[in-house]
Amino acid sequence: MRLRFLAVAFLTLPLALSAQTPQLIPVPREYRAQGDRPLPHGVQIVCTGCDSQDEFAATDLRNTLAERGIPTDDNAGLPIHLERKTGANLSDAAKPEGYLITSTNNGVSLTGATAEGVFYAAQTFKQMIEDTGGRNFVLHAADIRDWPAMKYRGLDDDMSRGPIDTLEFQKKVIRTIAAYKCNLYSPYFENTQQYKSNPLPAPPGGSISAADARELVAYARQYHVMVVPEQEAFGHVRHMLIYEQYQQLAETPHGSVLAPGQPGSLTLISQMFGELAQLYPSPFLHVGADETEDLGLGQTKAAVDKDGLGKVYLDFMQQINTTLRPLNRRLLFWGDIAQHEPDLLKAMPEQFKRDTIAIGWQYNPNPNGFIKYMKPYTDAGFETWVSPGINNWSRVYPNYTMALLNIQQFTRDGQTMGSTGQLNTIWNDDGEALASNNWYGILFGAAAAWQQGESSIPQFQQTFGQVFHGDRTGNINQAQIELMAAHDLIKSVKLGDGSDMLFWADPWAKDQQQNFASIRPILSQLRLHAERAMTLIAAARAAAPEARVQGPASRAQTAGSPSGPWALGPEPYNPANAFPANPTTLRETDAIDALELGARRMDFIGLKFQLADEMTQAYNQALATAASGDRKAKPSVSGLLGEINGVNGRIQDIKDGYSLIRDLYAQSWLRTNRAYALRPVLEHYDYTIGLWLARMDKMRSAQRQWSETKALPSPADVGMYAPAVMTGAPAPAPAKGKKATKAKKKK
């Protein structure tokens, strides 16, 4: 109930911010508005005495502004000075990444004591210029003093459960998280990093090569982002252990956990992390070690029975640490297993505590807070990080009601407990999550880790659309809120959370009817929220038409692809359209397309169940009419069957709905991911489309049978689960009078 109340509260918030509230992500610690300044001649970027790092920051700023149509090379433009000052007006604690922005009549100074500080000042400045339409740019001038609350602000990116980012999209992730002041990116590997020492597990076309890794690290370094690989080194290694050559290392046959008692387990870990250390020269390596659910069920059963699960687990963690100590890296590990063993944690060697950092993780909101997930480690003397999640897994669109509260609360409590880092997480559990859906949660995670204390969800919700998309209407913000409300509705009937399960569910599955009954009362409201989101997106696009540029079509383009905003490649270049009358263009349009697709999929969940019920009711009515013998009944049996299966029939609506979404989904996937792992998802679409095509054929057979014999097969024979009366459906009225008597005699 609390979650539903919060979602409703978000929906009723005014979308206009006060004049004193900065539309910036993250919100700076100290902000004093200095009024708005028109920029008729744009800006000129000045970087006097800069080293190569500051020159990169200046070039990045210049390129970003130029991409948005803001002149950056006009000598008449407002001077923007980037400057490194070791004596900047920042405390010693703030100097490593803090920055100052000072606005005067003569220009703006972007100052930091370090290269990081100068870079982050430039990132904030990008957000301070607004296009008010018609290429009229305004600087929201301000004096700012800002520095981060947490030293490490990162993103853990699942690369092992289906979608594998292209290298170019990984670079985009780096650029984007850096723009919002994250400084760590952690690709998650179970078997998708290629190793010379262990070449079998990495799938061809679906894994990261050594060359990819080196290129990504070099690219990220420019943006002050360290790349920290997470290679599972205890649990979650089934995709390795499925190979016969590793069977002696498996806790259980073809299981997910390395057996601690096997010397070869440490050899395998040493080989993998030795290669990782060469590819990713950050101060950290992440060994995973979460959810070791098989431990004690196979080769280590005797040891666990004798010493207990916690001791066996921590002994092996200590062996991993000792094995990898020559690499001179601190090891990150997930804290979910050992957090239940506070006494054993206190007894761990001091060297182990110095060498490791425990990361607590939980992905749901918790009104009672998250301190309990860090306290066992802090009490034992460990450094800790916190790890919330964006709630994107197994969802048609991420559940941001859950995600924003989880990120807000967990990060706040981590700061209270002295956690030095936040590692926000993306998981692709069922292999279907789309990367372009994730930015909303990624940006709020970045804001929460940088900002001190509890980050404001309403402030973020009112700011995101303009900062990330350049949407001045507030419609993109409201569209996100509408999808949150749709999730809340599904959550309220205890059927998951708007998940992919409901999207794929067969509404005529006999074993699911009791569950599906609970969703029927919310179908209309569910669809209205989703459709309002789509309408808001269309309004945002209409208010800010996209300027098209000439360029090659996407590799995903195929014959028959839709046009307009969903077109895979740009439209043919037309100078008249390059800068339309209102040239305020929406940015990150792939993410807007994905938002629309999420709304479309949510809407289809409701539509599918509505249509299935209507078909069931129509077939029951057709059976009753056929049994009555009333040849003049309206609608007729043929008419009822045609409503189910005919031109614009309801079966066709479901088939067409899945088909359209399939193609849009494939386009979104290929904009960010390698082709690897797409086929199983498309096969799911094709199988489901085939199911409804088969039902079309069965219903067509029933229609022929009625035409020839005036008899109908049972609902089961046409693929329909149709009890006498569906929930919420009126019972067919019994025939009366003489017709009833005739029907009875005929029967």
Image (spheres, helix red, strand yellow):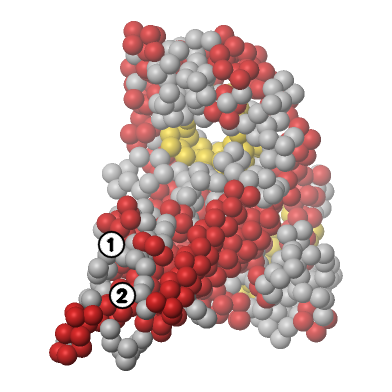
Q: Is residue 612 left or right of residue 355?
A: left
Residue nearer the viewer, 582 or 307: 307
Q: Is residue 79 visible?
A: no
Q: Above or below — where is 669 with respect to 579?
A: above
Quarter of the image for residue 298 reads: top left
Seen at 68% across and 83% down, the residue is 582
Q: Above or below — where is 254 with respect to 612?
A: above
Where is residue 154 shown, x and y percent of the image? 57, 42
Q: Is residue 203 visible?
A: yes
Q: Which residue is mark 2?
A: 623
Where is residue 693 shown, x and y percent of the image? 53, 65
Q: Quadrant of the N terminus?
A: bottom left
Name the kind of residue labelled 2 in the image.
Answer: Leu
Q: Nearer the viewer, mark 2 or mark 1?
A: 2
Residue nearer the viewer, 681 or 287: 681
Q: Is residue 671 left or right of residue 443?
A: right
Seen at 41% across and 84% down, the residue is 639
Q: Which residue is mark 1?
A: 517
Residue nearer the viewer, 545 or 721: 721
Helix, strand, or loop for circle 1? helix
In the drawing, what numbered circle is on residue 48?
A: none
